[in-house]
Amino acid sequence: MITVEVALYGTLARIQGGKYVAQTNVQVTNDATIKDLYEDLDISPQDRGYLFINAVLCDVPGLNAAIKEKLHDGDHIGIFSNGYMWPYQYRDGAQMSESLTSVLKEHGPLHHTYKKEE
Amino acid sequence: MGKKILRINMSDMQTSYEDVPEKWARWAGRGLTSAITYDEVDPTCHPLGPNNKVVIAPGWVTGSPAAPSSGRTSFGGKSPLTGTIKEANSGGLSGQKIAKLGLAAIILEGVPKKDKWYTLVINKDGVEFEDASGLIGKGMYDVDEILWEQYPNEPAVIGIGQAGEMKLSNAGISVNDPENKPGRYAGRGGMGAVMGARGVKAIVVDDTDGPGVDIADADLFKQGRRKLTKAIGKHDLTKKDGGLNAFGTNVLMNIINEAGGLPTRNFSAGQFEGAALNSGEKVAEIVEERGGEGMTGHSCHPGCIIQCSNIYPDEDGSALVSCLEYETAWALGANCGIDDLDYIAKMTRECNDLGVDTIEAGNTIAIAMEAGVLEFGDKEGALKTFDEIREGTPLGRIYGQGVEATAKAFGVHRVPTVKGQSMPAYEPRAIKGIGVTYATTTMGADHTSGYTIAPEIAGVGGKVDPLADEDKDALSLTFQAATAFIDSTGYCLFIAFPILDIEEGWAGMAESVAGVTGLDITGDDVIEIGKEVLKMERLFNKAAGFTPADDRLPEFMRYEELPPHNVKWTMADEDLDEVYAWVQED
Ligand code: SF4
């Protein structure tokens, strides 16, 4: 097993006993991915917003681009509930994971959320 | 009845109501303040001298019935902080009331012959010049209260605190909020000092029985308003209980910290260990715990449906300050190494009372900490800096001049400014796109100068690749132009999110503007109109002596690595020069 530090922001914090912010250590298997972490913590796709691993942006609302990212012992994972803002011009040029970069190439990176609005 | 321009000359105490000349007829908000400043203010004038002006203009749709979140007022002129043209805009009560009096703009010019202070009272019958000597030396909390007692109909109060009286370069212009508190500021760039230099302590605006705002095409306006309102109401960020409503702009604190882009201890690191304690989430927790007058989901003016403002409660639940914004909580928090929201709230109240911009004030304290005058994290010492300003001590006057003056006074070379104005809460080494905007905007380092608009929606799709470094200049220009447009509408910039993600919202914004003004504007015109505003501003700055060499980030960012990503600023100067290469005199 390895241990990762998980910070949950917004309503997701309740999962780990906080109100709007919670930070806890979570044990996962050696080969665990973000998908496993989401499942362990019971975070459903519609609740997922921005996600960071060690200060690198790995997901944005609506894309689910981080699920295959592998976790390492001592990683810091920050997960935001849906409905958080990060205006594009404050995000343009921030460090992003390779998988998010390639998914955004397809979708166009400028939107705030990639969820389809009816 | 067409809109008028109210000109108030403080040299001879004359006022006139002028028809809006053809050349300004299509402008409002920032477009109008910049057009008037460009046409009437000598770019080489001293900002505090007789030839500068304060131009006040509501946006195109401000004051029109139920246009959502549209009560912004622009304040423009030449900035004493930067020496550039300046537009700072604010929420609060003023925009809707000025618009409902049938005014496109108020131009405040000249300086009184006698060393005397005035309160200007503007209503449907005209302007009165009242003696303001009883208000001198008072902070904005007292001024707002006294003027509401003195004048009927809960008027808008536009005013300056002691900092504006002392003509300090970090003096902002206050606008009262619906609770008559001085929480809304046209803060950046020292426009409060320009107002003080006209001998005006306060402007009271009462719109009772005013003519209201003419709507050129009511059906089109209603159609646009409906689309925009719907988009705001269903977007995750702007809907009721969405991110902005629940946590305010401070919903950004933890995100920017997680990204390693939160400037910390005078821009020496990109993460602050106490960020969560200063965040919007924490504010919401404190509001719930303490109860009383504290609240999230507060409106800075009537008719805002996003309601991102808050009232931060003291320990006993009484209102301590409104509003604790992200930029404020960052400048007085992380950048000073302070992780105590109660102190941050107390300092914000001091800023609102004295009339200084919170971003510049926090950055100035961080410079004093860097210089060793205070320790990073010294919250008591930080709070006391405001006493120095209030008392007008030599040290207080240095602090009140902002970051550059304070850095010079104490020999600090890590100075996070562009064109004299200090940077807001996004580290350009970690978030490179914002650095292009900081470097090149006409306003000095300013985060609101380049707001998010999707280029494909704005009609420039396919022309830029946002993931390629070499296109950052084109993107930044697009953002700056879109912002100049939104700043002219009177809409709050936060409508940017729903109009970015929901196409109907974008069309709704443009249609509501076209409906009110009768101008033939569609979503495709936004960037070109915005660029016209930028061109006037850029040419003003050029005539004031600014060159491309001023469009640079501070030197230390080129050689100091910023943890945790350990990155420097690497953008080539030639790329920065591309942003405004298209601006030529006609
Ligand atoms: S969204 Fe916030 S800043 Fe904008 S108008 Fe509403 S309360 Fe004011």
Image (cartoon, coloured by chain):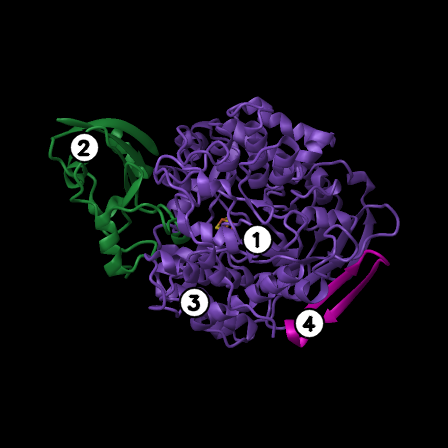
Chain colours: A green, B purple
In the depicted structure, whether residue B459 falls above or below residue B545: below
Residues under numbered marks 3 and 1 in contact, where contact means CB atoms less than 8 Å apart: no
Q: Earlier in the sequence, mark 3 or mark 1?
A: 3
Q: Residue at x 53, y 33 (%)?
A: B332
Which of the chains bears the disc numbered 2?
Answer: A
How packed mark 1 is, by other alpha carbons closer than 10 Å (few <14, some 14-19, many 20 or more), is: some
Residue at numbered disc 2: A72
* Quarter of the figure with residue B453: bottom left
Q: Measure the C-alpha gap from mark 4 to mark 3.
A: 27 Å
Image quarter of the N terminus of chain B: bottom right
Q: Measure the C-alpha gap from mark 4 to mark 1.
A: 34 Å
Residues under numbered marks 4 and 1 in contact, where contact means CB atoms less than 8 Å apart: no
Tell me, yes or no, whether the highlighted magenta stretch contains residue B12: yes
Tell me, yes or no, whether the highlighted magenta stretch contains residue B328: no
Which of the chains bears the disc numbered 4?
Answer: B
Q: Amino acid at mark 1?
A: Asp
- Label 2 or label 4, whichever lies nearer to me, is 2
* Quarter of the figure with residue A33: top left
Left or right: residue B76 compared with residue B491: right
How packed mark 2 is, by other alpha carbons closer than 10 Å (few <14, some 14-19, many 20 or more), is: some
Q: Measure the C-alpha gap from mark 2 to mark 1.
A: 45 Å
The lab-note entry on whether marks 4 and 3 share a chain reads: yes
Left or right: residue B229 compared with residue B410: left
Image quarter of the C terminus of chain B: bottom right
Q: Amino acid at mark 4?
A: Val
Q: Measure the C-alpha gap from mark 3 to mark 1.
A: 38 Å
Q: Amino acid at mark 2?
A: His
Residue at numbered disc 3: B508
- Label 3 or label 2, whichever lies nearer to me, is 2
Residues under numbered marks 2 and 4 in contact, where contact means CB atoms less than 8 Å apart: no
